[in-house]
Amino acid sequence: MDHFHNGLDIVSINEEVKSIADGKIVYTRYSEDQPFDSDYGTGNCVWVSHSKGILSAYYHLKNTRIDFSKSDNFVKEGEKLGYTGNTGHSSGSHLHFVVASENGAKLINPLMILPKIEDSISPEIGGLTLSVGENYTNINDGDSINVSKNFPLTVTAFDKGENSGQRRGVQYIGFIFNGIKIKESRFNEISIKKGKWINEDSLEYDELYYNGNYYIGDLSLKSGENTIQVNVADFHGNTNSKTFSFYVNRISGK
């Protein structure tokens, strides 16, 4: 992936998709509308405009269109919009759910507005990875490594929740390198500014991720002991922290 994921994927097969609030349907697209065009990534989709400038969108719906003309396209909270399917660029039946504002220029993490689900489990922090071109080295606590220059350093972290099969990104991640806070990032919303998507900490995708992991940075590791503390939190306030201590031998590059 080389871009922000703009919504929440909810695995579901042929289940009713309902409007999150009262609103008006402002856009729909089904394959029958343009049968000779290539399938859009969204597949069959419905967009609903709500109060206070909020928009919600529902992607990958089945080919079961519902006619809302009798209500002038107005819908009530909980009213059926369609059924979950596997249309568009989708590898399995699911709902891709989007929440936006500012006419789509700001995307809000759906977990900020959906009903809270029970979750008392802290997010997990995996290992560190040092990337060298197409190769990489996993760094465990207490390891010794040789480096010739600064390379991208990343870490894995995820929120699995209490139900098996769940795997979400974290709401917050922060890094402390050799006692100095170097970066912290929140994932409540992203906005488009000057043609680029950024999060609320004004960080672009490439400043937050590298090869699918959370990007710590191209750090100037010193000879001897180095420490990196990773702090994370999920959307329910559960937190976790992990400190990696490893030893570096700086060698001359070619």
Image (cartoon, helix red, strand yellow):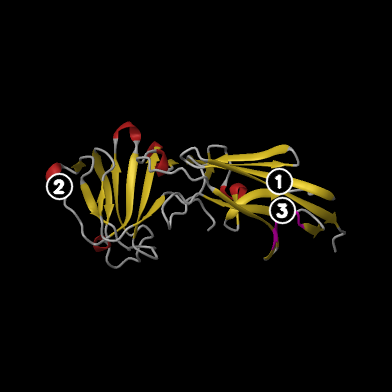
Q: Nearer the viewer, mark 1 or mark 3?
A: 3
Looking at the rendered structure, which numbered label has been put on residue 132? none
Residue 18 falls left or right of residue 250: left
Q: Residues within 10 Å of mark 1 (few under 14, many from 20)?
A: many
Query: Which range is magenta?
Result: 137-143
Return the disc, 2 or 3, that comes first in the chain's sequence.
2
- Horizontal and vertical percent position of residue 63: 24, 62
The answer to the question of whether label 1 and label 3 lie on touching residues, with beta carbons closer than 8 A, is: no
Q: Which residue is mark 2?
A: 69
Q: Is residue 208 above or below residue 200?
A: below
- Residue extending furthest bottom? 36
- Horizontal and vertical percent position of residue 249: 84, 56
Residue 47 falls left or right of residue 152: left
Return the disc, 2 or 1, that comes first in the chain's sequence.
2
Q: Nearer the viewer, residue 121 or 134?
A: 121
Q: Which residue is mark 3?
A: 141
- Horizontal and vertical percent position of residue 66: 18, 54
Q: Which residue is mark 1?
A: 228
Count of residue discs: 3
- Residue extending furthest left? 70
Residue 31 falls left or right of residue 136: left
